[in-house]
Amino acid sequence: MMDSSPADVAADAADPTDVPTDIEDASVDAPSDARPPWQQPWMPGPRARPPAGFLWGSATAGYQIEGQLGNTDWSIWEQLGRVTNNDRADNGPQSFTRWMDDVRALRETGQTSYRFGVEWARLFPTRASWEACRNATGDNAAKIATCRAAASTEGKQFYHQLIDALRSSTPRIVPMVTVHHWVMPDYIADPRMDFRSQGWMNARMRTDMALYAGVVAAEYGEKVDWYVTLNEPLVLVLAGYLDGRFPPGGRLDIDSAITVIGNLVYAHAGMYDAIKANDRTVAEMTGGPIAPAQASYVSIAHHIRAMFPATATNANDVRATARADWLNHGLFFDAIVRGNFDANGDGRIGAGEPSNDPALRGRVDYLGINYYGLTVMRSIAAIPLVGGLPLADELERGLPKSDFGWDIYPRGFEEILVRFGNEYRLPVVVTENGVADSADVNRPRFLYEHIAAMLSARQRGVNLIGYYHWSTIDNFEWVGGYCPHFGLYSVDFTNPMRPRTARPSAMIYRDIIRSGEVTDAQLTAAPAYRTPTRFCPATVSGSGADAGR
Ligand code: BGC
């Protein structure tokens, strides 16, 4: 597909900040007579009820809510001025001290599960603490014991008290732990330094992450059964190495992206094995969505988008869409479900690439899927591996928009759940789904439509066992800072107590959980989508193209 090597093309590529303009121009020649597929009318079809023990929850990530994590790659990123309005995670919801308010919100809305992150930099705040763990000797049990002793007492205790409060709620709120949600301690990755030898570029991350996952499983495994190893590994690659928005800020650096994907795939497999080895306790004996109950259920949270060619009759657009779909979606799942790893991303398992590899296959107990909307691909021959780029999210596509400029597209949710559920034949957990909607004018319909779409997918045979809305509360939205508000609960960031207040949609979610259904009457009565009152583009000056989210 390519004449030049990725390195050549990356070096020759125009400044990526030019890209949206190019593709915006390119989009005007789409035929205006035929309606594109994403504009076809849609109503969710017949819907199945959720199974007993269905995990009804919402999700957060440690760095986005806790505060007091100034020892991380992301806190340095903020100091480098890479976040909208110079917003700081430290000024966020302060869940490190106000976590009881989050638990109260979960209880008030009758949620039965909570997905949250356990921060590496919280458990091992200093290089010395991590080195003590990493250099531990002896068998697995001895090493893990040394690591647990080296970890911060305050850090360990913080998550214990949260987990205890969740589990002692009535009804119980089942904890789901994300081991790695993008953020690294500054002694592992410092965005001011050459990134080629650090963070996910370093093969040592494979064993570091496995060790860290083992420590988390040993520390909390008696109380936790549900794990996400890596949050959205491909978003990390895209934003960290291709469009420059996340640390370490690489741009169109295809070679690095390929290296990082390899490290992520093997890190996940190691994390899976470490969790299995170190959590042997069934915490939830009864009532879960999988029987018989197991000591751990492990997956990634994979960001999956409905993808379309900009012009369905343009073979290059179609090819670029298939390539983007494979690289973003299929490649990682195929590696960790089937052991087939397309290490160079060329779309096939070539000689020397792992095939049905016992070191990789079967490392998934459920498919964790994050869904936010659609991506429309336009071919651009010079773009290596993909042969195209996503059109900017903010472009008008005849669909309702969120405050982020993302299209709201519930039909795609149903389709991707059916597609991936059928393809891999595993239970599916929606690990994230949500909308930036500060005024809460669109979230009610969004909730009804997306949960109805999910229950339609269940009716169509997908073994759906959980749904986590993003997010429990408003939080630090990475480069978007505090502009986009994803919370079922708003947070008053001007008040030192950071009070959480239920938005009307929080109570809609509570009622859906109670009834276990979305009726046609609710869908009809839900207020129509409105034009957002605020606009929070996901780019900051100097951060490059918004390629793909
Ligand atoms: C991420 C979250 C993020 C959300 C909204 C997801 O891709 O996992 O951390 O806040 O999207 O952008």
Image (tube, rainbow, N blue to C red):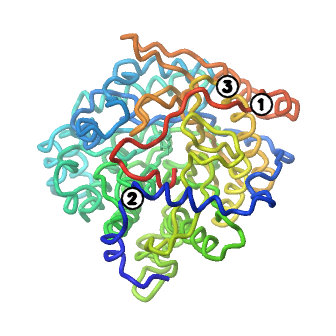
Residue highlighted by disc 1: 528
Mark 3 and mark 1: Cα distance apart in space: 9 Å
Q: Nearer the viewer, residue 283 or 224?
A: 224
Q: Which mark is residue 249?
A: none
Residue highlighted by disc 3: 441
Where residue 125 appears, x then y in whole percent? 20, 37
Q: Which residue shows up at 17% across the image and 57% down it?
A: 194
Element on which disc 2 rests: helix
Element on which disc 3 rests: loop
Q: Residue flagged by tag 1: what amino acid is it?
A: Ala
In terms of image quadrants, where is residue 446?
A: top right
Mark 2 and mark 1: Cα distance apart in space: 36 Å
Q: Residue flagged by tag 2: what amino acid is it?
A: Pro
Q: Nearer the viewer, residue 346 or 472?
A: 346
Choose the circle earlier in sequence order: 3 or 1: 3
Mark 3 and mark 2: Cα distance apart in space: 34 Å
Where residue 39 appears, x then y in whole percent? 76, 51
Residue highlighted by disc 2: 16
Crowding near pointer 3: few (<14 within 10 Å), some, many (20+)? many
